[in-house]
Image (cartoon, rainbow, N blue to C red):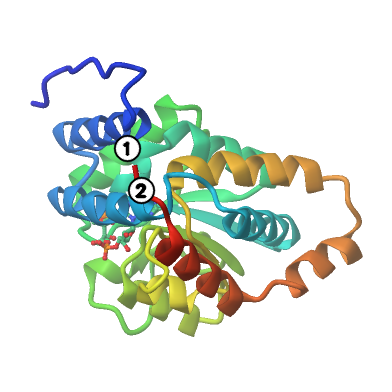
């Protein structure tokens, strides 16, 4: 088990250390896979290079993603073991603010981990969590990795896929879905496949998307469509790469 460690609030890496402890606790509770620790390390490296903040460009992408969720016929927030450990409450709050469904969708799927994540999300306020039915498939993906709910991700027109692996992001895009990807690596296949790549930490991206969704909630549909259509994914990725190259590091 991970030992309890008090992180001093004045530590320069305070947020980052707290995030690490949440992932560790996720592994201990059977929510996060051990590979999730490696994914977290990779994400941290990019976050460090980005200055551990939401850039102006990422903020714009989060606003556009919020507009997509509000415009969707059926939006689904996909949750894996890392997202469940890092931001369960923030996921539930975004779902409530946008009317989206929540579905657990794992790369390393086991029945135990699926159930542990569903229970964890319920403990954090989710009323309905999809993913256990697994009565449909993402075409082109091997058995366990391709399992989804027929009335969830399979049916959705807009899917938020945070920290996704490249294969699945590509397979979902091939199904014609509008894909909103949160990934700190602007060079990853998932980010490059996305309709809206959000190069930001999931712990900052979700609350910021909720804030944007609340602000956009009363805006007319034509204006929301303008927000979505004005977005340039290629430019967002270029902006992130530029931020990484020009960063000043502590
Ligand atoms: O819980 P499972 O079984 O579905 O497995 C989830 C992981 C994350 C292990 C699986 O999807 C995986 O192996 O993903 P990858 O291929 O390592 O990709 C994860 C991506 O997320 C990488 O590009 C990381 O830079 C990025 N990332 C990691 N932590 C964060 C992040 N992006 C945003 N916020 C983070 N906190």
Residue 115 place in picture, x, y as percent: 28, 41
Quadrant housing residue 106: bottom left
The residue located at (75%, 61%) in the rendering is 71
Compare residues 217 and 200 and report the one nearer the observer. Answer: 200
* Left or right: residue 114 compared with residue 194: left
For label 2, the residue is 249
**Which of marks 1 and 2 precedes in the sequence?**
1
Viewer-proximal residue, 94 or 119?
Answer: 94
128 lies above or below 196: above
Q: Is residue 33 visible?
A: yes
Residue under circle 1? 85
Assign a secondary structure to mark 2.
loop
Q: Is residue 153 visible?
A: no
Count residues near mark 1 (Cα–Cα under 10 Å), then give few for <14, some for 14-19, many for 20+. Answer: many
Would residue 70 be found to the left or right of residue 92 on screen?
A: right
Q: Which residue is drawn at 42% across and 69% down?
A: 186
Image quarter in which the C terminus is found:
top left
Residue 126 image label: none
Q: Nearer the viewer, mark 2 or mark 1?
A: 2
Q: Is mark 1 within 8 Å of ligand 1?
A: no
Residue 161 falls in image quadrant: bottom left
Rendered-image quadrant of the N terminus: top left
Label 1 sits on a secondary structure element that is helix
Residue 69: x and y, percent? Answer: 66, 57
Q: Does the residue labelled 2 lie within 8 Å of ligand 1?
A: no
Query: Counting other residues with Cα less than 10 Å from the Cα at mark 2, is it few (<14), some (14-19), or many (20 or more)?
Result: few
Task: Give the quadrant of ligand 1.
Answer: bottom left
**Residue occupying image coordinates x 76% and y 74%:** 229
């Amino acid at each position: 088990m991970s030992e309890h460690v008090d992180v001093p609030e004045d530590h320069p890496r305070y947020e980052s250390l707290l995030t690490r402890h949440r992932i560790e606790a996720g592994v201990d509770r059977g929510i996060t896979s051990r590979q999730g620790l490696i994914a977290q390390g990779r994400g941290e490296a990019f976050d460090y290079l980005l200055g551990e903040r939401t850039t102006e460009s990422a903020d714009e992408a989060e606003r556009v993603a919020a507009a997509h969720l509000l415009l969707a016929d059926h939006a689904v927030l996909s949750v894996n073991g890392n997202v469940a450990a890092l931001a369960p409450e923030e996921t539930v709050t975004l779902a409530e603010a946008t009317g989206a469904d929540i579905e657990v969708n794992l790369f390393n799927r086991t029945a135990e981990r699926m159930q542990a994540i569903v229970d964890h999300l319920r403990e954090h306020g989710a009323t309905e969590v999809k993913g256990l039915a697994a009565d449909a498939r993402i075409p082109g993906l091997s058995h366990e990795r391709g399992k989804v709910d027929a009335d969830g991700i399979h049916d959705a027109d807009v899917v938020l896929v945070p920290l996704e692996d490249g294969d699945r992001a590509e397979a979902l895009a091939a199904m014609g879905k509008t894909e909103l990807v949160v990934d700190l690596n602007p060079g990853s296949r998932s980010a490059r496949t996305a309709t809206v790549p959000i190069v930001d930490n999931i712990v900052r991206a979700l609350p910021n998307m909720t804030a944007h969704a609340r602000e956009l909630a009363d805006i007319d549909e034509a204006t929301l469509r303008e927000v979505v259509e004005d977005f340039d994914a290629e430019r967002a990725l270029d902006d992130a790469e530029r931020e990484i190259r020009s960063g000043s590091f502590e």
